[in-house]
């Protein structure tokens, strides 16, 4: 039996990750909410560390950088006026970097992200952040419809355990790996941060 291939592989698509200098780095929801409390992600710390390294290289290369932050209700999850809704210090935006707040999983929905990306003249986007199965996935899928070529920095993303619908649970790592496998089939190049330069 032959090894399975993605639709992108079968179609002969170029799966070479783009140079950061030619890309827009979009950091999605790397907020304190995911570091402690009910939404704490088991792999948040290593993912944040990888995202910080990627951000440093992106800044040095001249990539266009966009920070996305989920905005929840006051006193609730993702309260942007509270510490829990703040962007994690290790990847805090510079004054020159755009911060876009969103209310839905897809970072394009109800925001001006598409317009801002188009203004850069770049069609390659590199995504990192939280959660792999939710906001990374929905943003990646929408990006294809918008004509963007997406690369996901896999080790700079993480997610959480989820109920399996039968009284058990699926581990965060399984959810993460399955989400990336789904996206690799048609929607994105999957890469490790050290390969993105």
Image: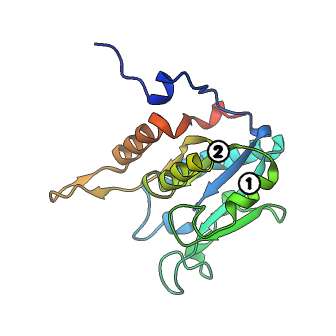
Q: Residue at x 67, y 49 (%)?
A: 52
Identify the residue position indicated by label 1 in the image: 117
> In the visual, does 197 lie left or right of 172?
right
Q: Residue at x 36, y 22 (%)?
A: 4
> Of 7 and 93, which appears nearest the observer?
7
Instruction: Return the x and y of residue 91 as percentages of the image width and height.
Output: 68, 57
**In the image, farthest residue toward the left:** 166
Instruction: Return the x and y of residue 191 as percentages of the image width and height.
Output: 57, 34
Q: What label sits on residue 148 in the rendered view?
A: 2
- The quarter of the picture where residue 1 lies is top left
Neighbour tally class for label 2: few under 14, some 14-19, many 20 plus, Cα within 10 Å:
many
Residue 3 appearing in the image: yes
188, above or below 146, in the image: above
**In the image, farthest residue toward the bottom:** 74
Instruction: Return the x and y of residue 197 as percentages of the image width and height.
Output: 73, 33
Give the distance between the C-alpha atoms of the residues marked 2 and 1, in whole angstroms: 10 Å
Instruction: Return the x and y of residue 51 as percentages of the image width and height.
Output: 63, 48
Q: Earlier in the sequence, mark 2 or mark 1?
A: 1
Neighbour tally class for label 1: few under 14, some 14-19, many 20 plus, Cα within 10 Å:
many
Q: Residue at x 64, y 45 (%)?
A: 148
- The quarter of the picture where residue 152 lies is top right
> Of 55 and 181, which appears nearest the observer?
181
């Amino acid at each position: 039996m032959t090894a399975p291939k993605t639709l992108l592989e079968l179609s002969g698509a170029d799966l070479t990750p783009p140079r950061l200098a030619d890309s827009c780095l979009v950091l999605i929801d790397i907020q304190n909410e995911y570091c402690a409390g009910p939404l704490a992600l088991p792999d948040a710390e290593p993912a944040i560390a990888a995202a910080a390294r990627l951000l440093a290289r992106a800044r040095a290369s001249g990539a266009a950088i966009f920070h996305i932050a989920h905005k929840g209700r006051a006193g609730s999850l993702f309260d942007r006026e509270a510490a829990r809704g703040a962007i994690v210090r290790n990847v805090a935006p510079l004054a020159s970097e755009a911060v876009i707040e969103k209310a839905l999983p897809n970072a394009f929905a109800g925001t001006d992200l598409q317009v801002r990306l188009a203004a850069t003249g770049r069609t390659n986007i590199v995504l990192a952040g939280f959660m792999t199965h939710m906001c990374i996935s929905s943003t990646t899928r929408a990006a294809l419809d918008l004509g963007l070529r997406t690369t996901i920095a896999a080790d700079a993303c993480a997610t959480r355990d989820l109920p399996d619908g039968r009284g058990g649970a699926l581990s965060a790592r399984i959810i993460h790996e399955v989400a990336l496998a789904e996206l690799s089939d048609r929607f994105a190049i999957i890469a490790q941060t050290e390969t993105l330069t």
